[in-house]
Amino acid sequence: MKIGIIGAGNIGGNLTRRLTALGHEVSVANSRGPHTLTALAEETGATPVTVAEAARGAEIVVVTVPFKNVPDLPAGLFDGAAEGFTVIDTGNYYPQRRDGRIAGVEDEGLTESRWTERHLGHPVIKAFNGTYAQDILDRHRPAGAPDRMALPVAGDDAAGKEAVRALIDQLGFDTVDAGGIDDSWRQQPDTPVYGLREGVEGVTKALAEASPQRPEGFRG
């Protein structure tokens, strides 16, 4: 599968490592340009590209940039993507630590991924946002393993969600359907499932226990 990854930080870098190891054709981009990705490309065999080129021909595009930087992504970002492509959003809103106050979240009450969808102009599937980056490398397990972790996956596009869940299964993790994008507050920072290292049962329980009230530390 051809996969484009926009953002080469901890999550983007480790997804690049694992997905190339699984045989996927990965293009990876960051805000600083392809020349800064030489080491990652040499390590993994991924192709370093500009952000504008990252989605070209891609069946799945992973957007893993700081939340506040989503509006800065170039227009026409998905021009040339494969027909029926899916976008994975890994983002989180950290108003006090990084992003500042964002009115769409604070005043309109949008979930983080709904706000991201508006700026990208394409539906997204929310996944990996509460996953420790190192776990992508170290905690993958074969299907049926008793200690296999599960990850919540939210989205409105049923076909896209199934594509993402299948990819996560291939990466070595179970998944739990966390509902639509308007339900994705259940996996935002400081919810019970955020950073949880448990299986399907534990993740399902944690999603059910989430509160829609955003904690004080995660308000702008």
Image: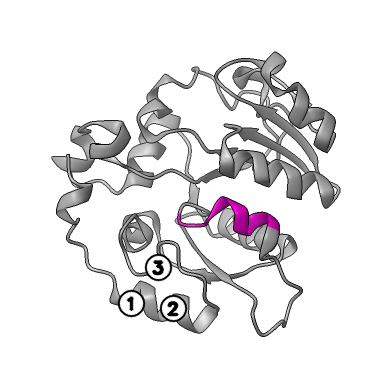
Q: Quadrant of residue 219?
A: top left
Judging by the rendered image, the residue that carries numbered circle 3 is 193
Q: Amino acid at mark 2?
A: Thr
Judging by the rendered image, the residue that carries numbered circle 2 is 204
Name which residue lies at 32% across and 42% down: 93
Within-10-Å neighbours for mark 1: few <14, some 14–19, many 20+: few
Q: Relative to residue 128, is residue 73 depicted above or below?
A: above
Judging by the rendered image, the residue that carries numbered circle 1 is 208
Q: CA distance from mark 2 to mark 1?
A: 6 Å
Question: Residue 112 appears at what percent x and percent y?
Answer: 33, 45
> Magenta stretch?
130-137
Q: CA distance from mark 3 to mark 2?
A: 9 Å
In what element is the residue under mark 3?
loop
In what element is the residue under mark 1?
helix
Q: CA distance from mark 3 to mark 1?
A: 9 Å
Marks 1 and 2: in contact by CB < 8 Å?
A: yes
189 left or right of 172?
Answer: left
Q: Quadrant of the C terminus?
A: top left
